[in-house]
């Protein structure tokens, strides 16, 4: 039910990000395993790395290194597929207030609210 509600209100992905978002949504329910980057389990940066590979972008397997390649963007200008980053963590923005990430062993890959300490970053140019 949460997945349908989040998807229904999602801003349109940037051009070329549809595959990233589609892949991310298809991974919901998979397990969290430290160091994993798919296809059956993921850690946070392995999840975003695998999703971005679907869109033709190669990312490192490190949340810090992924964030270093992007730049901050306010949630009001964010698009589905942008990175949601914080200390030692990364996920994918779905709509204001929501992300998909490989959170931890307890929740695995899931839709979650963007919690305090996280912010959105993008690789796209904004005007």
Image: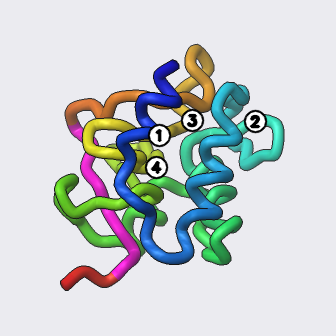
> In the picture, residue 99 is in which quadrant?
top left
Residue at horizontal 72%, vertical 29%?
A: 30
> In terms of secondary structure, where does tag 4 sit?
strand
Q: Is residue 9 left or right of residue 119?
A: right
Q: Residue 79: horizontal and vertical position, in percent?
A: 35, 60
Q: What is the CA distance from the residue labelled 3 to the residue labelled 1?
A: 18 Å
* Tag shown at residue 41: 2
The stretch drawn in magenta includes residue 113: no
Q: Are marks 1 and 4 in contact (CB under 8 Å)?
A: no
Foreground pick, 121 / 98:
98
Q: Which residue is mark 4?
A: 92
The numbered mark, 2 or 4, whose residue comes first in the sequence reads 2
* Tag shown at residue 7: 1
Q: Are marks 4 and 3 in contact (CB under 8 Å)?
A: no
> In terms of secondary structure, where does tag 3 sit?
strand
> In terms of secondary structure, where does tag 2 sit?
strand
Q: Are marks 2 and 3 in contact (CB under 8 Å)?
A: no
The numbered mark, 2 or 1, whose residue comes first in the sequence reads 1
The numbered mark, 4 or 3, whose residue comes first in the sequence reads 4
Q: Residue 47: horizontal and vertical position, in percent?
A: 62, 48
Residue at horizontal 46%, vertical 46%?
A: 91
Foreground pick, 30 / 98:
98
Q: Nearer the viewer, mark 4 or mark 3?
A: 4
Q: Which residue is mark 3?
A: 102
* Tag shown at residue 96: none
Q: Nearer the viewer, mark 2 or mark 4?
A: 4
Q: Name, please, the residue furthest toward the right.
A: 40
The stretch drawn in magenta includes residue 118: yes
Q: Residue 126: horizontal and vertical position, in percent?
A: 24, 80
């Amino acid at each position: 039910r949460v997945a349908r509600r989040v998807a229904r209100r999602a801003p349109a992905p940037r051009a070329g990000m549809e595959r990233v978002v589609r892949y991310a949504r298809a991974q919901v329910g998979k397990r969290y395993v430290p160091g994993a980057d798919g296809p059956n389990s993921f850690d946070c940066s392995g999840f975003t790395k695998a999703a971005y590979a679907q869109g033709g972008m190669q990312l490192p397997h490190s949340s810090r290194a992924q964030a270093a390649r992007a730049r901050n963007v306010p949630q009001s200008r964010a698009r589905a597929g942008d990175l949601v980053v914080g200390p030692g963590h990364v996920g994918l923005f779905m709509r204001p207030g929501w992300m998909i990430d490989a959170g931890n062993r307890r929740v695995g890959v899931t839709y979650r609210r963007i919690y305090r300490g996280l912010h959105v970053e993008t690789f796209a140019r904004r005007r």
